[in-house]
């Protein structure tokens, strides 16, 4: 069936071939939507009729779309307006499974030949998405590629990373429940957890990423539904011991969800170490070109299924063209991440010890508090480097303004290098006291290394540092 991929066992494929070809496999499945399963409630007679219609659809289309146009000239019994709406599409649509690239299926709904076919769909014997909010062939191909990359049982693509996170939290944490999260995280995630979820009676324990004793205590004192942390975190790039966390949480029935946006499955696969779920802002490394908004959640089939049910109600559906951009970006993910890793590692090493740098935060450095944890879980340490300028807010701003290569912008994971001062970009409205309370320093810089030549990145950062006293 169309959605049979949901139940596939975890794949161990991690090479570039998996990235390139998983969507080609989906081309035939997702775009035909005509696979039949063994009959259940509708009976063998209806099942055979559906299969016959499916076969008829196949025979209606010849191997090449040009032949379809020649064979089916449409109907002349309708008026001009009606013909303009229906002719060339209603019957004899071209076969698209032989298209090298996955087609962008721009549709909001899916049609059925007759009532018997619709009943077959409702009974689970005929594959379809029914309506655009419930799925799309292009999106499904992208989901399957991500599923294989992460080694999960199911994957759900959505309109943004925050949409994925919020749907996950609302679907998996019951009213009156309790979650555990970490201090260093994306501001909007913290904002939702601390300001919206209490309206549902949901409480939260916030821990340092390395406070495993605190996690054990929270699990003992509360009926915890979910442990949720980024790894690496934003902006200090803390890394959590996923295996240790999973061993503490699983006996208590607490799900473990890791936001792997900063790592990508090329560098780290949390599911392999006991996490139940991984989420990503696919706008970042997955898309890779700063031109798309998307998010995804991947992992345990039952948990993703609950999120999918909630998502089907809430919406937040990704546009098919956006799904295609993510799908295309994934094809070069491993190539780009290798360059991101290398540029960031070299920059971190160069800045550490620089006379105008107070401290460098990068998990690939031995000085990072979670370096040993990062080495256990990561093959590369990501493309983001955070560092503190020796100076105040305005000296730091002067440094950023002096940079000529990176754009001053939020986000990360694209081919272009981006630089930001979190105090100004994300926390300007908080004021000095609130910023200090959550650990955001005025002299902190976050550099998201792109795929430019390293020598150009280094030269620009060094000349900018020379501009400050």
Image (cartoon, rainbow, N blue to C red):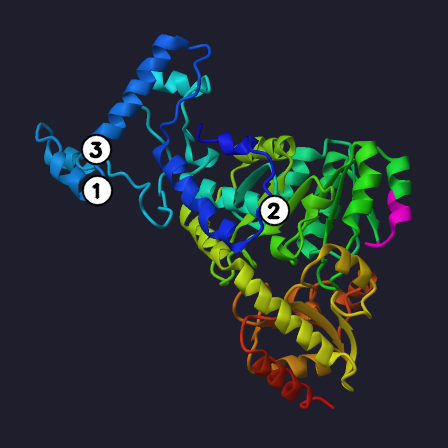
SS type, badge 2 = helix
Q: Is residue 71 left or right of residue 43?
A: left
In magenta segment, residue 212: yes
Q: Nearer the viewer, mark 2 or mark 3?
A: 2
The image shows residue 166, relative to residue 450, as above or below, that is above
Q: Distance between the residues labelled 2 and 3?
A: 38 Å
* Tag 1 secondary structure: helix
User: Which circle, 3 or 1, is nearer the viewer?
Assistant: 1
Q: Mark 2 points at which residue?
A: 150
Q: Give the range drawn in magenta.
A: 208-215
Give the crowd class for mark 2: few <14, some 14-19, many >=20 residues within 10 Å: many
Q: Work out whether 123 lies above or below 295.
A: above
Towards the viewer: 132 or 372 = 372
Please report the residue visible at 69 percent of the width from the left and 45 percent of the height from the top: 272
* Secondary structure of the residue carrying numbered label 3: loop
Image position of 411 (left or right of 35):
right
- Provide the residue designation for mark 1: 65
Residue 452's spot in the image, x, y percent? 53, 75
Query: Which is more N-terminal, label 3 or label 2?
Result: 3
Q: Residues within 10 Å of mark 3 (few under 14, many from 20)?
A: many
From where the camera sits, is residue 203 visible?
yes
Q: Which of 197 and 95 is in front in this view?
A: 95
Q: Of all residues shown, which one is farthest toward the left?
A: 76
Q: Distance between the residues labelled 2 and 1?
A: 36 Å
Residue placed under numbered mark 3 in the picture: 92
Instruction: Say which quadrant the C terminus sits in.
Output: bottom right
Seen in the image, is 208 located left or right of residue 268?
A: right
């Amino acid at each position: 069936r169309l959605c049979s991929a949901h139940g596939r066992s975890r794949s161990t494929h991690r090479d570039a071939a998996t990235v390139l070809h998983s969507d080609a496999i989906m081309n035939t499945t997702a775009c035909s939507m005509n696979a039949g399963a063994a009959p259940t409630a509708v009976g063998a007679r209806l099942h055979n009729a559906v299969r016959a219609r499916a076969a008829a659809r196949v025979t209606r289309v010849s191997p090449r779309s040009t032949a379809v146009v020649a064979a089916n000239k449409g109907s002349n019994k309708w008026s001009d307006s009606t013909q303009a709406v229906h002719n060339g599409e209603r019957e004899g649509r071209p076969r698209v499974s032989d298209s090298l690239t996955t087609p962008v299926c721009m549709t909001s709904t899916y049609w059925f030949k007759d009532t018997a076919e619709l009943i077959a769909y409702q009974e689970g014997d005929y594959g379809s998405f029914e309506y655009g909010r419930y799925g799309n062939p292009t999106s499904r191909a992208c989901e399957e590629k991500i599923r294989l990359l992460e080694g999960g049982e199911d994957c759900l693509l959505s309109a943004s990373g925050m949409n994925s996170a919020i749907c996950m939290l609302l679907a998996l944490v019951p009213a009156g429940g309790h979650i555990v999260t970490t201090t260093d995280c994306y501001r909007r995630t913290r904002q939702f957890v601390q300001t919206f979820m209490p309206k549902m009676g949901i409480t939260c324990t916030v821990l340092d990423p390395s406070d495993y004793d605190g996690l054990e205590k929270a699990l003992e004192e509360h009926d915890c539904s979910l442990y949720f942390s980024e790894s690496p975190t934003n902006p200090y790039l803390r890394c959590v011991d996923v295996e240790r966390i999973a061993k503490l949480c699983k006996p208590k029935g607490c799900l473990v969800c890791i936001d792997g946006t900063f790592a990508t499955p090329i560098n780290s696969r949390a599911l392999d170490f006991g996490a139940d779920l991984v989420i990503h802002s696919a706008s970042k490394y997955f898309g890779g070109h700063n031109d798309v908004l998307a998010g995804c959640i991947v992992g345990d089939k039952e948990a993703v299924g609950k999120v999918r049910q909630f998502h089907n109600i809430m919406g937040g559906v990704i546009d098919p063209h956006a799904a295609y951009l993510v799908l295309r970006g994934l094809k070069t993910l491993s190539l780009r991440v290798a360059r991101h890793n290398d540029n960031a590692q070299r920059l971190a090493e160069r800045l550490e010890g620089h006379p105008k740098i107070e401290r460098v935060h990068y998990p690939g450095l031995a000085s990072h508090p979670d370096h040993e944890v990062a080495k256990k879980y990561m093959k590369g340490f990501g493309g983001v480097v955070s560092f503190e300028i020796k100076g105040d807010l305005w000296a730091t701003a002067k440094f950023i303004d002096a940079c000529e290569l990176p754009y001053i912008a939020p986000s990360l994971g694209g081919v272009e290098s981006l630089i930001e001062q979190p105090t100004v970009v994300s926390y300007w409205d908080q004021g000095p006291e609130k910023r200090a309370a959550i650990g955001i320093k005025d002299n902190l810089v976050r550099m998201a290394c792109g795929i430019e030549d390293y020598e150009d990145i280094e030269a620009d950062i060094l000349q900018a540092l020379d501009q400050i006293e």
